Amino acid sequence: MATVHLQANHAAFTDGVRELEVDGATVGAVIDELATRFEGLGPLLREGSSVAIDGELQPKGTIYAAVGPDADVHFLAPIAGG
Amino acid sequence: MTATENPPSKYKYVGTRPVRHDGLDKVTGKARFAADLDLTGQLRGAIVRSPHAHARIVSIDTSAAEAMPGVKSVVTGADFPAIDPSDSAHDEAVNNIARDEALYVGHAVAAVAATTMEEARAAAAAVEVEYEVLPAVLSIDEAIAEGAPIANSTNRTLFTGDTEPSNIASVGPFQRGDVDAGFAAADVIVERTFTTKAVHQGYIEPHACVADVGQDGKATIWASSQGHFAVRSKTAKILGWGTDKIKVTPAEIGGGFGGKTTIYLEPIAVRLSQKAGRPVKIVMTREEVLRATGPAPASKIHMKMGATKDGELTTIQGTLHYSNGSAKGYAALTGAMSIASYKFPNLDLMAIGTVDNTPKSAAYRAPSAPQAAFAIETLIDEVADQLEMDPIELRLKNAVVEGDPTAMGAPHPKIGFIETLEAIKNSEHYNSPVPEGAGRGFGTGFWFNIGEQSSATVNLNEDGTATVITGSPDIGGSRASMALMAAEELGLDVHRITPIVADTESVGFTDITEGSRATFATGMAVVNACRDLIEQMKERAAVMRGVAADQVAWIDGAAVIEGPPSEGADPVSIAEITAAAKMTGGPLTATASLNAAGAGPSFAAHLADVRVDEETGQVEILRYTAAQDAGTAIHPSYVEGQMQGGSAQGIGWALNEEYIFSADGVMQNAGFLDYRMPVASDLPMIETIIVEVPNPSHPYGVRGVGETGIVPPIGTLANAIADQTGVRMTNLPMSPPNVLKALNER
């Protein structure tokens, strides 16, 4: 299972949990699983987050990016540029 | 001067400095910007803008304007479809043209198209708008004050589920470790509050567009932007149209720096054109640009930092307020996230974005990072002072390397921060004495860089030349970098390649040129298309030589036959292959599209010598050196140009620039005489050191270089001023009156 790392603002929906194991083959599947476990977290992850997998920043909005069984998945605040 | 990890000789074209393909047109004035375009029957548009910082629009009477000479069409917010405030496009839509509420002085409320500019302006003045003036909020402090009036009735704090209007746009805590324990372990603790004012991106070309709606109801737009596909999608959304009804042709762009990632004029021009049945051109004045287009956010940052006597940073704690202006946004979150350069084992940051009645903020080169770096770099310098440590040694001791966490916890990929610090440490500038009576300051900066979607098509012409077609507007020399990467792949001289930026119907979808992404992501699309073409050319050469395709290798820009029966035959050149193309399968073309992952973060380190006139408060920059990790410099001259441009803009932000508002929210310095940006005579030659630690996620190691250079200058100059005067400047700008005031309070 992938290790998911959440930000402090995500923890408001998870009773303070910031790191957890999640089963999911893609970013979208991981989000779906987290949304099922924690009410209210889904929209924040889908619309208000960037994602890094094993330290590599993923393209914005990517839900089909593959998540390996031992991957480290960080949900980050949205990143843009100027 | 270039410090490299890879020897420059590794590539034949990448890393060279050819004359840019668009250079001649630009220096001779032949390049066509949006304002240069004139169509037959074209009308001129003028915008009616709110004189109030906050008001309810009671009614708009356009009848007098419509009856004026030359007037062909008038639009108001009522000519655009309603959009729900929960829609992510809402704020940009109502920023283009207000519906029920004017949110800042300069907010567009109506527009007129007439035969001449004079007629359009006269008619705009005749539009009668009845306002109910509402209480206005003009600063971060006013926005967060107890009982503050609501600045924007549609704003709800993002992702909290709150349903009540609020002046808070977003709240984001970032935490790791135990900050109390971190401070307990510290021998030195420094703490200050920093304020910065809104500043403008200052592009030389005002926003401009021409829109022409045909009899078939389809709109063609020529626009100055950082992304014409985004102009198409945003315009379509605001009009309620399909994207198939809009074609956008990119004009040359006279600077954007993040400020042209959004739109202001195009939906209005299209609607005016549709109503009039004629093309409409709208060109902003400089005053409109300053009053009504996005500045970078004002900020108020309180920061506290601890370190051991050995110089190990133990903890950081702070609250970062950023003003988004009149709309919601992520400015504060991005500012906190940009604190990513040092190994703070304990971290507690609260990012709070606010909403007020100043112009809606927009991205500006490494958005939100310069404000945060001002605080961080000042406090680190103060720690170095108190510990009597060399400021670079202190940073080297705490600098992040691959695998260390950012403020968000995600580990850094391969980065070159140490190498960048060492480049300054080893520079002639750092190892020269500080001029008599002057001060020397050092500072650093970080920026993420991003990937996103890009497309490229490469066509081989019948004489062996090539055309590289992309959808990334060239705002910083990207035509040259695309051509250089194509030259390296194909083995074709860079000036036998023509790089062009195509309209939305002539190339695949491409995201905005932002986040220093064009050379990284669009460059990868170009490389992939070239590699596809090489495979095609190998197959064609095999047909021409009567061998199997797997007997053909691509070496030095030609197909080389390996193995019998043709081994040793002359290589088949690109020109030979393209000349024979119609006999071997037809024209040679390849297209590649991608959504790029693996953008490489970039670090910069700056060094400045300044002399502060202690009688006037004026700061003169005597010498300035910028080092930055480019990954790989595809065209070193343009990398240096980006570093110098970012430095110059950061210097202006530090020393002079600020939005000055009256008590009723009117910007008092809406022109370049009073909004003082640095000019060439204000600056020394900015020396550059390109550091090259390649990004392993790009075929040539590109990181992107457009933004990071603006991050270090504010802290660097504040530290230089402190070195000479002993005064820590914490409020921007460090202009003569502000510096003099601080010196007098010593």
Image (cartoon, helix red, strand yellow):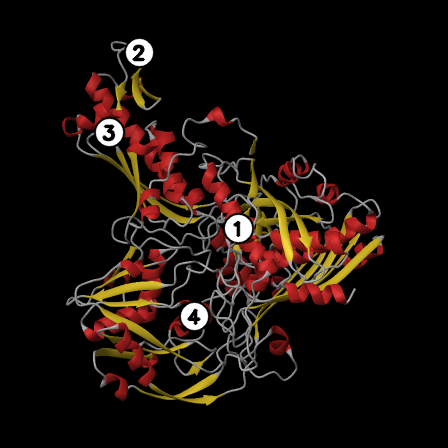
Q: Can residue B680 be seen in this view?
A: yes
Query: Which residue bears the numbered disc 3?
Result: B464
* Circle 1 SS class: helix
4 vs 1, front mark: 4
Quadrant housing residue B352: bottom right
Q: Relative to B362, say whether B254 is above or below.
A: above
How far separated are the C-alphas under marks 3 and 2? 26 Å
Marks 2 & 1, CB-CB < 8 Å contact? no
Query: Which residue bears the numbered disc 4?
Result: B287
Q: In which quarter of the image is the C terminus of chain B?
A: bottom right
Query: Which residue bears the numbered disc 2?
Result: B563
Whether discs 2 and 1 lie on one chain: the answer is yes
Label 2 Cα crowd, 10 Å radius (few <14 / some 14-19 / many 20+): few
- What's the amino acid at mark 3? Gly
Instruction: Please give the chain letter of the residue carrying mark 3.
Output: B
Whether discs 4 and 3 lie on one chain: the answer is yes
B370 sits left or right of B236 in the view? right
Whether discs 4 and 1 lie on one chain: the answer is yes
Q: What x and y, as percent, mark residue A24? A: 51, 50
Dot placed on the residue nearer the N-terminal end, 4 or 3: 4
